[in-house]
Image (spheres, helix red, strand yellow):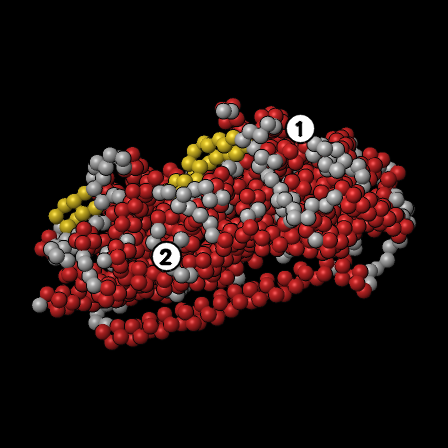
C-alpha cells in the first residue's frame, strides 16, 4: 500500500546528517549555524513524524526494508524500519520534545567555545538519530543498535565536560551498568533466534502465537525471553537493581538530562516491552509480569523516598524520574501497556519541563545546583517559576493536568490487580507530590539564601529558553486530554483507541465499577492535595539544617552505591589484581618457565659450536629434522 | 596465479630491500611493495565470483609427496586481504619511527608478510609448515634486534614457545601424511583421511597446542603480553593484527576438518578454556597500567572468543569468526598506531602518567575513541556483527552448557567496557598532565592511516554483509567437512 512510507528513513537520516555536519565542521562553522543545523534537522524529522502520524492514524502499518544487515543461511536480519501507531507516538515525543530541547540548548550552551558547542550539538543529533532508530527498528537487532547508540550518546554527553574526572566516572558508570542489561538483552535475542529463526517483530510474534508451522516457543522459552528482555530494560530504564547510574548521569549538561535522562532514552525499556506486548501478554509470561510489577513498584517507592531528602535540584528530579519509570513498569507488569505509554508521553512533557526549568534556575544562579543556597527565586524568574508550578502540579497528578490521567490509569490498573498494590502505589504518588512541592517551595519561595553576587545576578532566562518552557507547560497541562478515561466520556480515550491495533492491554479479571473508579479518583485527589499542603507547611520558609537519623539514610540514598562498591566493584578489582600480580606471572607463566628451564638445561648439554639465539634456532631445527626422519623411519617400516 | 603473486611480491621485495642503502628509500620501497600486494589482493577479490586465476600449483619435493599448491578460498581471501591491508596501514601509521639498518628491518617485515601469506594460502601441509616457520623467523629477528630493553629474554621465550608448538605440529603433519592413501601432504588427501576416533583424539593435541600457543589461548598466552610490549611497535602490530590469525586459520583449515571427530570430542573442553581465558584476560586488563599490556590482554580475550565460537561448530559462529578475523586485525592495528604516537610524543605509555590528552590532541582522541568502541563491539562498528554472530553461535552450540558459555563469555562484553572506558578516561580525559612539552595533534600520514581504519570500521559496521558474502560459501563447505553427526546416525 503505502509506498510513500518507504522514505521514512529520512526521519533518522536528518539528525544523522546534522551529526556529521556539526561533528566534522565544528571548527569551521559559527555557533549560529551549528545551532540552526542541529535544531533544524530535528525540526525536519518532527514535520516528517507528523506526516507519518497522519499516515498511520487509521491503523496502517508499514515495514520498509532497505538492505540485508546480516544474512547467513536461514538467519536474515534486514535493515528495516517499522511504522505503526506505537512508533509514531514515540516519534512525535522524541522529535517534538527533542526539537524544543535543541532550541533551548542554543541559548543554554552559548558559553561554550565553538568547537565544543559543535561537539555538543553533534552528540545531541547523534542521540536523536539513535533514539529514532530504536523506536523505528522493525526487528530486535535494529532496536538493539539504536539501544546501544543511545547508550553511547548518553555516555558522551554525561562526560561532555571531560576535564572533570568525576563526570567521566559517572559517564563510565552509566555505560557499564547499561552493558550489564545489554548482555541480558543480547542473550534474549539469541534465544529468540534459536526458536523463531528470525528477529523481526512480526515474525517472532507470529511464532509466539503459534501461527508459524515448525517453529514455536515453549512456556519456558517465553519466561526466559521476557525476563531477559526485562533485565535489559532495567539497565536502560534505571530500575532496581541497575538504577544507580541515572542520578549520577546528572553530571551532563541540563538539557541533556531533560532529553536523554528524563524524556526519551530512559523510556526505551518501556518502549521495548510495550513493543513486545504480544510476548508479555502470553500466559507463560505471568511470572515475568509479576516480577515487572513488583520491581517497578519497589523502584518507584525506593526512589521516591530518596528524592525526599536530596538537596541538589537535578538529583531530586533524577530520583523522581527513576520513580516515575517505576510507575510505568508497574503499568507494564499489570498488562496496562497503553497506560504505560500514556505516562511515557505525559512524563516526557512535565519532566522535560522541570529539567529545563531547573536549567534556567542553574543558569541564573551561575551554576549553583544546591537548593539550600536558593530560595525566593519565584519573584525574579516569573516564567520559570510558573511553568515549574505547572510541571509540579502535573506530576503530582492534580485534575485536570496531564499527570492526573496517566497516573490514574496506572493506579486503576494496579487496583484491578490487587488493592495492596494500589495502596503502595498511591502512597508513592503522595510522596511524589510531597517531594516535588518541597523542591518547588525551597527553590522558589521564602528568602534567598545564596551569595550577594548571585542575588545581584539573578535574572529570567532569554526567550530561547523560556519559549520551550511555555510550550512544554501547555503540553503538561493539556497532554492528558488524549486519554480521558471511559468513565468520564465514552470514546474519549483516543490514545487507547489509536494504539489498539498494536498494543492491546490485557483484560482484567476484576474490572471495577464506575462508582469505585470515581471513589478512587476522589481519594487520590484529596490525598494529593493534602500532601501538597503538608509540603507547603513544612517548606514554605525553609531553614537549613543537617539531616539526622533516618533522614541521613535517605540523604545517602540508602547507601546502595556504597553497597555495590564494596560487594561487587572492589572484590572484582582485587581479584583482577591477584590474577595480574600473582596467578599470571607466578603460576601460569611459572609453569611455562619451568618447562623452558628444563629444555634449556637439556639444550645446554647438547650445545656444540654455536651460541646465542640464532644458534639455538639452528640447533632446534636440526633436532627437529632428526625427529622427523626418526618418525618417518619408524612409520614407513 | 593471484595466490602466487601474493607471496612472490613481498618475498622478492623483501630480499631486494636488504640491498638498499638509504633508510628513506627502504621505507618508501616497503610501502610501494605493500601497496602492490594490496592491489593484487583486491584484484583477487574481484575474481572471486568467477574463481579463475586464483589458485596456483607447481611441483615441489614430489618425492616426499609434497607440492607447491596454493589456493585462495573464502577464508584465504579474508586473511590475505587483512595482511595486504595491514602492511600499508602499519607503514603509514609508523612513518616517523626510525630504525637502525632500516633496510634490514623493512626487508624482514616483508619476508614475514610473505610467510604469513603462504600460511593463509598453502594447500599442502608441508608447505604450510614451511611458511609457518618462514613467518616466525623474521618476527624473531625483528623483535630481538629492534625491540625494547628486555627484548632478548622475551623474544627468546616467544621463539622457543612457538617453536615448541611448531614441532608438535610437524610431528602431527608427518604422522598424518603417513596415513594418507597416496602418501601425500596435499590438503585433499588430509581431508580424505578416515582415522579412528582414538587416533584423532591424541593427534588433535599435537595440532591444537601449536595453534593455541600462536593465537594464544589461555593458559598458553604468557609469551604474548611481554612480546607485544618489547617488540618494536610496527612488529607488534603485525604480530597481533595478522600473525595471531595463523593459529585460527590453522584450526579452521588444518585441524577441525582433518580431525572432525576429535574436534567434536574435545570441543567442549577447548571452549571452556577459551571462555575462562576471556574472563581471565579481561580481569587482568582492568588492572593494567601499561597501554601495550592492556591491549595485549584485551586481544587475548577477543581471540579466546573467536576460538570458542569456532568450536561451537555452527554457521553463525563460523561466519562471525570469519568477519572478526579481519575486524580484530584492523582495530588492534589502529589502537597500536595511537599507542605508538603517545609513546613517541609523551615518552611513556603508563596510563597513570598520562591524562588530558583530549585537550591537546582532540583529533587523535576521536580516532582512539572510535577504534576503542569498535574494539568493544558497539553496533554500527565492525566489531558488532562479528561478536553478535559469535555469541549467537555459542548459544546454539550443541552442548549442554551452551547457555552458561554464552553468559560467561558475555561477561567479557561488560568487562571490556570497563577496561576500555577506564583507559580512555585516564589517558585522554581529565585535566592535562603538566610539565609536558606542547604537543601537536596528528600528522598527515597518521591521519590518513587512522582515517582508513575508521572508514573500514564504519563500512563493515553498517554493511557487514559485504564481508560475510566472501566467506559464505567457504563456511558452508567447512560446516560439511566438520560435521560428524552423520557418523552417529549410522
Of residues A94 and A611, the one nearer the viewer is: A94
Which chain is mark 1 on?
Answer: A
Q: Where's residue A617, x and y in %?
A: 25, 64
Q: Where's residue A363, x and y in %?
A: 77, 40
Which chain is mark 2 on?
Answer: B
- Is label 2 in a helix, a strand or a loop? loop
Q: Report which residue position mark 1 lands on.
A: A32
Task: State which quarter of the image contains the C terminus of chain A.
Answer: bottom left
- Is label 1 in a helix, a strand or a loop? helix
- In the displayed structure, would residue A436 be above or below residue A562? above
Q: Where's residue A271, x and y in %?
A: 60, 42
The circle drawn on residue B398 is 2
Residue at 20%, 67% (x, y): give it.
A623
Separation of residues labelled 1 and 2 (CA atoms): 59 Å
- In the displayed structure, would residue A270 be above or below residue A468? below
Badge nearest the viewer, 1 or 2: 2
Q: In which quarter of the image is residue B213?
A: bottom left
Amino acid at each position: 500500500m503505502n509506498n510513500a512510507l518507504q522514505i521514512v528513513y529520512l526521519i533518522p537520516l536528518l539528525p544523522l546528517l546534522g551529526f556529521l555536519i556539526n561533528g566534522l565542521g565544528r571548527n569551521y562553522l559559527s555557533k549560529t549555524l551549528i545551532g540552526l543545523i542541529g535544531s533544524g534537522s530535528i525540526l525536519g524529522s518532527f514535520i516528517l513524524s507528523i506526516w507519518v502520524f497522519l499516515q498511520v492514524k487509521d491503523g496502517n502499518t508499514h515495514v520498509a526494508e532497505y538492505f540485508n544487515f546480516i544474512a547467513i543461511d536461514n538467519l536474515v536480519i534486514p535493515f528495516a524500519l517499522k511504522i505503526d501507531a506505537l512508533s509514531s507516538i514515540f516519534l512525535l515525543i522524541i522529535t517534538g520534545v527533542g526539537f524544543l530541547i535543541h532550541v533551548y540548548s542554543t541559548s543554554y550552551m552559548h558559553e561554550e567555545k565553538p568547537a565544543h558547542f559543535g561537539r555538543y550539538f553533534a552528540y545531541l543529533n547523534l542521540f536523536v538519530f539513535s533514539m529514532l532508530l530504536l523506536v523505528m527498528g522493525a526487528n530486535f537487532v535494529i532496536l538493539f543498535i539504536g539501544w546501544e547508540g543511545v547508550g553511547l550518546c548518553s555516555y558522551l554527553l554525561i562526560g561532555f565536560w571531560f576535564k572533570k574526572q568525576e563526570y567521566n566516572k559517572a559517564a563510565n558508570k552509566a555505560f557499564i551498568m547499561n552493558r550489564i542489561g545489554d548482555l541480558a538483552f543480547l542473550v534474549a535475542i539469541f534465544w529468540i533466534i534459536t526458536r523463531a529463526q528470525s528477529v523481526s517483530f512480526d515474525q517472532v510474534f507470529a511464532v509466539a502465537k503459534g501461527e508459524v508451522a515448525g517453529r514455536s516457543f515453549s512456556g519456558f522459552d517465553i519466561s526466559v525471553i521476557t525476563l531477559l528482555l526485562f533485565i535489559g530494560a532495567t539497565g536502560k530504564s534505571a530500575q532496581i537493581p541497575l538504577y544507580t547510574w541515572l542520578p549520577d548521569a546528572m553530571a551532563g549538561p541540563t538539557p541533556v538530562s531533560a532529553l536523554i535522562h528524563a524524556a526519551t532514552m530512559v523510556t526505551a525499556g518501556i518502549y521495548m516491552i510495550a513493543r513486545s506486548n504480544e510476548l508479555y501478554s502470553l500466559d507463560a509470561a505471568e511470572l515475568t509480569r509479576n516480577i515487572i510489577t513488583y520491581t517497578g513498584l519497589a523502584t518507584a517507592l525506593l526512589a521516591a523516598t530518596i528524592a525526599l531528602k536530596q538537596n541538589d535540584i537535578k538529583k531530586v528530579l533524577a530520583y523522581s524520574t527513576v520513580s516515575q519509570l517505576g510507575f510505568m513498569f508497574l503499568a507494564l507488569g499489570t498488562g496496562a501497556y497503553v497506560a504505560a505509554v500514556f505516562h511515557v508521553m505525559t512524563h516526557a512533557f512535565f519532566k522535560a519541563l522541570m529539567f529545563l526549568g531547573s536549567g534556567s534556575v542553574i543558569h541564573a544562579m551561575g551554576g549553583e545546583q544546591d537548593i539550600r543556597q536558593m530560595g525566593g527565586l519565584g519573584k525574579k524568574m516569573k516564567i520559570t517559576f510558573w511553568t515549574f508550578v505547572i510541571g509540579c502540579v502535573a506530576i503530582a497528578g492534580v485534575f485536570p493536568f496531564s499527570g492526573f490521567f496517566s497516573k490514574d490509569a496506572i493506579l486503576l490498573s494496579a487496583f484491578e490487580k490487587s488493592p495492596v498494590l494500589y495502596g503502595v502505589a498511591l502512597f508513592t504518588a503522595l510522596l511524589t507530590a510531597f517531594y516535588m512541592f518541597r523542591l518547588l517551595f525551597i527553590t522558589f519561595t521564602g528568602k534567598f539564601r545564596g551569595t550577594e553576587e548571585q542575588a545581584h545576578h539573578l535574572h529570567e532566562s532569554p526567550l530561547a529558553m523560556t519559549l520551550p518552557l511555555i510550550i512544554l507547560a501547555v503540553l503538561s497541562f493539556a497532554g492528558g486530554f488524549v486519554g480521558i478515561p471511559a468513565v468520564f466520556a465514552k470514546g474519549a480515550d483516543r490514545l487507547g483507541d489509536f494504539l489498539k491495533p498494536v498494543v492491546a492491554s490485557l483484560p482484567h479479571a476484576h474490572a471495577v465499577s464506575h462508582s469505585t473508579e470515581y471513589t478512587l479518583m476522589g481519594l487520590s485527589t484529596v490525598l494529593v492535595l493534602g500532601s501538597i499542603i503538608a509540603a507547603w507547611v513544612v517548606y514554605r520558609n525553609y531553614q537549613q539544617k543537617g539531616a539526622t537519623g533516618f533522614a541521613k539514610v535517605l540523604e545517602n540514598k540508602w547507601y546502595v552505591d556504597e553497597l555495590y562498591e564494596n560487594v561487587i566493584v572492589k572484590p572484582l578489582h582485587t581479584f583482577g589484581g591477584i590474577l595480574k600480580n600473582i596467578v599470571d606471572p607466578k603460576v601460569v607463566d611459572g609453569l611455562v618457565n619451568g618447562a623452558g628451564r628444563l629444555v634449556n638445561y637439556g639444550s645446554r648439554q647438547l650445545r656444540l659450536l654455536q651460541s646465542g639465539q640464532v644458534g639455538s634456532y639452528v640447533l632446534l631445527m636440526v633436532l627437529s629434522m632428526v625427529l622427523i626422519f626418526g618418525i618417518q623411519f619408524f612409520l614407513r617400516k | 596465479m593471484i595466490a602466487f603473486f601474493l607471496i612472490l611480491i613481498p618475498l622478492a621485495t623483501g630480499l631486494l630491500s636488504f640491498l638498499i642503502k638509504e633508510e628513506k628509500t627502504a621505507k618508501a620501497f616497503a610501502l610501494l611493495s605493500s601497496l602492490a600486494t594490496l592491489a593484487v589482493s583486491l584484484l583477487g577479490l574481484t575474481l572471486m565470483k568467477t574463481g579463475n586465476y586464483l589458485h596456483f600449483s607447481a611441483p615441489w619435493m614430489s618425492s616426499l609427496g609434497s607440492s607447491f599448491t596454493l589456493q585462495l578460498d573464502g577464508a584465504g581471501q579474508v586473511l590475505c586481504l587483512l595482511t595486504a591491508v595491514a602492511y600499508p596501514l602499519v607503514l603509514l601509521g609508523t612513518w616517523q619511527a626510525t630504525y637502525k639498518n632500516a633496510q634490514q628491518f623493512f626487508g624482514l617485515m616483508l619476508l614475514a608478510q610473505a610467510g604469513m601469506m603462504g600460511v593463509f594460502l598453502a594447500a599442502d601441509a608441508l608447505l604450510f609448515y614451511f611458511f609457518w616457520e618462514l613467518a616466525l623467523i623474521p618476527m624473531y629477528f625483528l623483535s630481538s634486534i629492534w625491540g625494547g630493553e628486555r627484548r632478548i629474554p622475551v623474544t627468546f621465550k616467544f621463539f622457543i614457545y612457538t617453536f615448541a608448538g611448531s614441532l608438535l605440529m610437524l610431528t602431527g603433519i608427518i604422522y598424518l601424511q603417513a596415513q594418507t592413501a597416496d602418501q601425500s601432504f596435499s590438503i585433499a588427501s588430509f581431508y580424505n583421511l578416515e582415522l579412528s576416533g582414538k587416533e584423532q583424539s591424541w593427534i588433535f593435541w599435537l595440532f591444537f597446542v601449536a595453534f593455541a600457543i600462536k593465537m594464544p589461548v589461555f593458559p598458553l598466552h604468557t609469551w604474548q603480553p611481554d612480546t607485544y610490549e618489547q617488540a618494536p611497535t610496527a612488529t607488534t602490530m603485525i604480530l597481533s593484527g595478522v600473525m595471531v590469525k595463523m593459529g585460527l586459520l590453522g584450526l579452521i583449515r588444518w585441524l577441525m576438518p582433518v580431525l572432525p571427530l576429535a574436534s567434536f570430542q574435545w570441543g567442549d573442553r577447548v571452549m571452556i578454556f577459551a571462555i575462562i581465558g576471556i574472563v581471565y584476560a579481561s580481569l587482568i586488563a582492568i588492572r593494567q597500567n601499561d597501554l601495550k599490556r592492556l591491549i595485549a590482554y584485551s586481544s587475548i580475550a577477543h581471540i579466546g572468543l573467536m576460538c570458542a565460537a569456532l568450536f561451537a561448530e555452527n554457521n553463525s559462529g563460523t561466519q562471525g569468526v570469519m568477519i572478526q578475523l579481519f575486524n580484530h586485525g584492523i582495530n588492534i592495528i589502529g589502537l597500536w598506531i595511537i599507542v605508538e604516537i603517545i609513546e613517541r610524543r609523551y615518552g611513556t605509555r603508563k596510563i597513570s602518567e598520562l591524562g588530558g590528552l583530549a585537550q591537546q590532541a582532540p583529533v587523535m582522541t576521536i580516532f582512539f575513541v572510535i577504534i576503542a568502541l569498535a574494539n568493544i563491539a558497539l553496533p554500527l562498528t565492525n566489531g558488532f556483527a562479528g561478536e553478535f554472530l559469535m555469541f549467537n553461535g555459542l548459544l546454539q552450540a550443541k552442548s549442554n552448557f551452551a547457555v552458561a558459555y554464552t553468559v560467561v563469555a558475555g561477561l567479557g562484553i561488560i568487562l571490556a567496557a570497563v577496561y576500555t572506558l577506564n583507559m580512555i578516561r585516564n589517558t585522554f580525559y581529565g585535566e592535562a598532565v603538566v610539565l609536558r612539552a606542547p604537543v601537536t595533534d596528528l600528522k598527515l600520514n597518521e591521519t590518513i592511516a587512522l582515517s582508513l581504519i575508521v572508514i573500514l570500521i564504519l563500512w563493515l559496521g553498517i554493511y557487514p554483509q559485504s564481508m560475510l558474502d566472501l566467506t559464505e560459501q567457504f563456511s558452508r563447505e567447512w560446516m560439511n567437512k566438520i560435521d560428524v553427526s552423520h557418523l552417529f546416525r549410522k
